[in-house]
Amino acid sequence: MKRAKPMAPWFWLGKHVMRTSEGEAMISLFKTDDAWSSLVLRLTLGLVMFPHGAQKLLGLYGGAGFDGTMAFFTQKMGLPWIIAFWSLSENLLAASGCWQGS
């Protein structure tokens, strides 16, 4: 029985990513536009992500803070410290990236 050829990993991203060169594909994937709707979506996502990251990293809004969350991730969940640290920092940085339009 003949196996089906696997789809390219970028296939699901649509027609805007399928360009002639790899550099053009990455630029079209990560660029932001000037539409108001994109601004509203980015600010809303950043507004939702900030309290989540602040609970984990800063201990705001009743969260455990850096020490408590690191202990939970490394001791209870058994994650390596580098993965736990990345998870803590990326939550807060994701909100900042959304606000900046990155």
Image: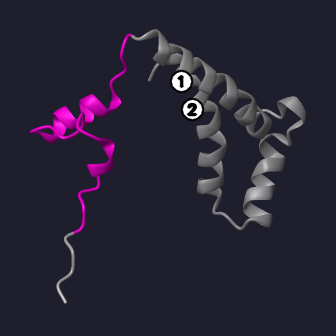
Task: Find the residue positioned furthest to the left.
Answer: 20
Q: Quadrant of residue 15?
A: top left
**Closest to the observer: 77 or 41?**
41
Residue under circle 1? 98
Amino acid, disc 2:
Ala
Residue at the location (63% across, 47% down)? 87
Separation of disc 1 and disc 2 at Cα? 6 Å
Magenta run includes residue 99: no
Across and down, in percent, residue 68 comes to: 84, 48
Across and down, in percent, residue 52 comes to: 73, 35
Magenta run includes residue 16: yes
Across and down, in percent, residue 57 comes to: 74, 37
> Which structural element holds mark 1?
helix
Quadrant, the N terminus: bottom left
Quadrant, the C terminus: top left
Q: Quadrant of residue 31?
A: top left
Q: Is residue 9 left or right of residue 22?
A: right
Give the magenta-colored segment's residue range.
6-34
Residue at the location (81% across, 46% down)? 67
> Which structural element holds mark 2?
helix
Q: What colour scheme was applied to this rendering of the protein?
A: one colour
Label at residue 4: none
Residue at the location (67% across, 43% down)? 88
- Callout 1–callout 2 Cβ contact below 8 Å: yes
Q: Tell me: residue 3, above or below residue 35.
A: below
Q: Is residue 53 left or right of residue 21?
A: right
Q: Is residue 18 left or right of residue 61?
A: left
Q: Tell me: residue 2, above or below residue 83.
A: below
Amino acid, disc 1:
Cys
Residue under circle 2? 94
